[in-house]
Image: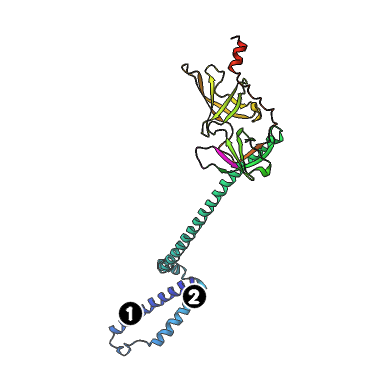
Amino acid sequence: MGKAVFLISHFLYILFHYRLTTSLLTRSMDSTQTFQVFNRGPSPAARLVFFAVLSLLLMFVDARFRYLESTRSALSVLVSPLQRLATMPLMLMQQAGDFFVTQNSLLTDKTALQRQHGIDSVQLVQQQALLQENMQLRNLIALQQRGQYTGQFAEIVYTERDVFRRKVLINKGSVAGVQAGQVVMDDKGIVGQITRIFPWLSEVTLITEKDHAVPVQVLRNGLRSVTFGAGDTSQLSLRYMPVSTDIQNGDILVTSGIDGIYPPGIPVAKVEKIERDAAYPFARIACLPVGGVDKYRQLLVLSASPKLPERPEPEPAPLRGQLKKSGGY
């Protein structure tokens, strides 16, 4: 760049001197009639040699004594806008190319990031589900380790297609030693009871199945009763409880162990709402299931309880004649 400016400055300087010299010679020849022979001036070759020698001389003087530094600086300032204007199209083309390349790269990166975000979101949801399942299994294992309940783990594989029936199928059947009547629970409380057996599957009737009965007692005072399913996964009811019954909101209901079906002491429900009306002999008591009857997949099938002695048959009604004889008729 410096050499180009230097050559341009010297060229302009030589051109200026050439024009000045030519003008002076022309004027001197026009003023005097004596030198009309020399109107044509020096030849082009002589001019070329003269200006070449003059340029070399000026270059030597400038390189030696630096007399033209200020002139060269001034010319560089004047020429700089022209240089920028000359290079502007190329710069604009380069910037436009960089812009489109950058835009395409950003769009590609955005698409890749969105795809990765979707994959990460799915993995995060799966991980949360696995963490919850792991916690559920840990709680079930803890129940066994504490020796409170014994049995085998099972997992829900099917649900009843009829929305009005509260039944599920688990992946344990007669091959695994499951028997009808065994109790199924989770880490919170009772979930249901096995009612049908298949080789590799078992049907579990949930405690919320309509009119499904579970013998319970109030943990606070030992009051015995029976909970019945209402056909809704979030509700149980206590029926035939007198209005004056000692039961309160928040009472915990556990299995009483009566009838030998459900082991005693397992949480079943929590009293949510009590309606007492003096016009009716029985109170309306609504309860919430403690166990996750519609939440978890991992369950614990409790071992079969020891069988109780057979219930004695009711005595037959005495004949009318015998009653009359014993009554003194």
Q: Residue furthest top?
A: 328
Which residue is label 2 attached to? 61
> Residue 229 appears in which quarter of the rendering?
top right
Residue 219 in the image: state x and y as whole percent. 62, 23
Q: Residue at x 40, y 75 (%)?
A: 12
Q: CA distance from mark 2 to mark 1?
A: 26 Å
Q: Earlier in the sequence, mark 2 or mark 1?
A: 1
Q: Which residues are magenta?
A: 161-169
Which numbered disc covers residue 23?
Answer: 1
Q: Amino acid at mark 2?
A: Val
The quadrant of the rendering that contains the C terminus is: top right
> Residue 223 appears in which quarter of the rendering?
top right
Residue 106 in the image: state x and y as whole percent. 48, 58
Q: Amino acid at mark 1?
A: Ser
Q: Residue at x 57, y 49 (%)?
A: 123
In the rendered image, residue 165 lying in the magenta stretch gets the answer: yes
Q: Is residue 187 above or below residue 5?
A: above
